[in-house]
Image (spheres, coloured by chain):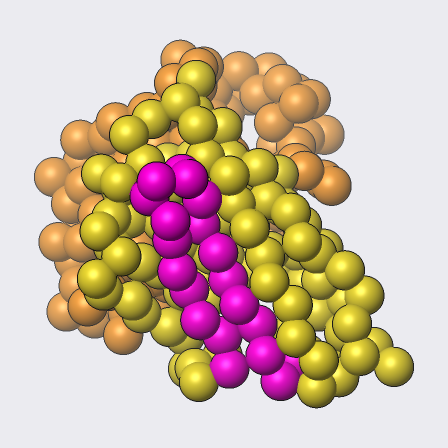
Chain colours: A orange, B yellow
Amino acid sequence: QPVLTQSSSASASLGSSVKLTCTLSSGRVSYIIAWHQQESGKAPRYLMKVEGSGSYNKGSGVPDRFSGSSSGADRYLTISNLQSEDEADYYCETWDSNIAVFGGGTQLTVL
Amino acid sequence: EVQLLESGGDLVQPGGSLRLSCAASGFTFSSYAMSWVRQAPGKGLEWVSHISGSGSYTYYADSIKARFTISRDNSKNTLYLQMNSLRDEDTAVYYCAKDRPATHWGQGTLVTVSS
């Protein structure tokens, strides 16, 4: 089954931009992934799906500041004009042969 | 508006059983696969199981296979997870999620396995 690799932590300043990465394991560069946000003590929230082509499809109510992109086996989540409420854990998810896999998550700190 | 409401979490002794429920509303329940995902304290998300819209197909993570059973009642718009032979390591918040990948999440229900 696929493996999704994420950096354990990231940080960026208020008002700046940050790009989080989710890397698919070998041989799965065409896979679609989803990004989820989880604020401390809350349930996850779906943000978007990102395809291998780089196109992305956001969930309802997700601010325009959030965007997705792709390069090879890497899937990206870019957050522009960082706000304090963006401080959260971010997880990527994919599916293969009816099995779901989550990345280990990136803890984003807004400085 | 899609709503998923889990219930059934509790404190249970090792070896015990528990059944979780997830009441769904705001969408055509039978048209969507549904999943259970759990999160141990301080840890990341772990997929547990999912079931097809009709209920005909079920899939499980190796860590819980043969101990947990996923099911659904499309007439009641409800998803279930029957958990048997519970272990300490099953302690987690259990979330139900709609579709694959998950596009909506419930608020979670806490299962604590401890003597």
Question: B89 or A73, which is in the foreground?
Answer: B89
Horizontal arrangement in the rendering, residue B110 relative to residue A31 (left or right) = right
Question: A111 or B2, which is in the foreground?
Answer: B2
Choose top left, top right, bottom left or bottom right for residue A68: top left
Residue A23 position within the rendered picture, expressed as x and y whole percent measured from the top left? 33, 57
Q: Residue at x 53, y 15 (%)?
A: A81
Q: Residue at x 38, y 53 (%)?
A: B72
Horizontal arrangement in the rendering, residue A50 relative to residue A11 (left or right) = left
Determine if the magenta segment contains residue A90. Answer: no
Question: B111 or A16, which is in the foreground?
Answer: B111
| Quadrant location of the N terminus of chain B in the rendered image | top left
Q: Is residue B10 above or below residue A71?
A: below
Residue A39 position within the rendered picture, expressed as x and y whole percent measured from the top left? 65, 36
Q: Hey, which residue is sitting farthest front in the picture?
A: B75
Q: Residue at x 24, y 48 (%)?
A: B53
| Quadrant location of the C terminus of chain B in the rendered image | bottom right
Determine if the magenta segment contains residue B68. Answer: yes
Horizontal arrangement in the rendering, residue B99 relative to residue B12 (left or right) = left
Choose top left, top right, bottom left or bottom right for residue A60: top left
Q: Is residue A62 among what the camera can see?
A: yes
Horizontal arrangement in the rendering, residue B77 relative to residue B90 (left or right) = left
Q: Is residue A106 among what the camera can see?
A: no
User: Magenta: predominant secondary structure element?
Assistant: strand
Residue B16 position within the rendered picture, expressed as x and y whole percent measured from the top left? 71, 80
The boundaries of the magenta stretch are: B67-86
Q: Is residue A26 above or below residue A9?
A: below
Q: Is residue A80 above or below residue A77?
A: above
Question: A50 or B75, which is in the foreground?
Answer: B75
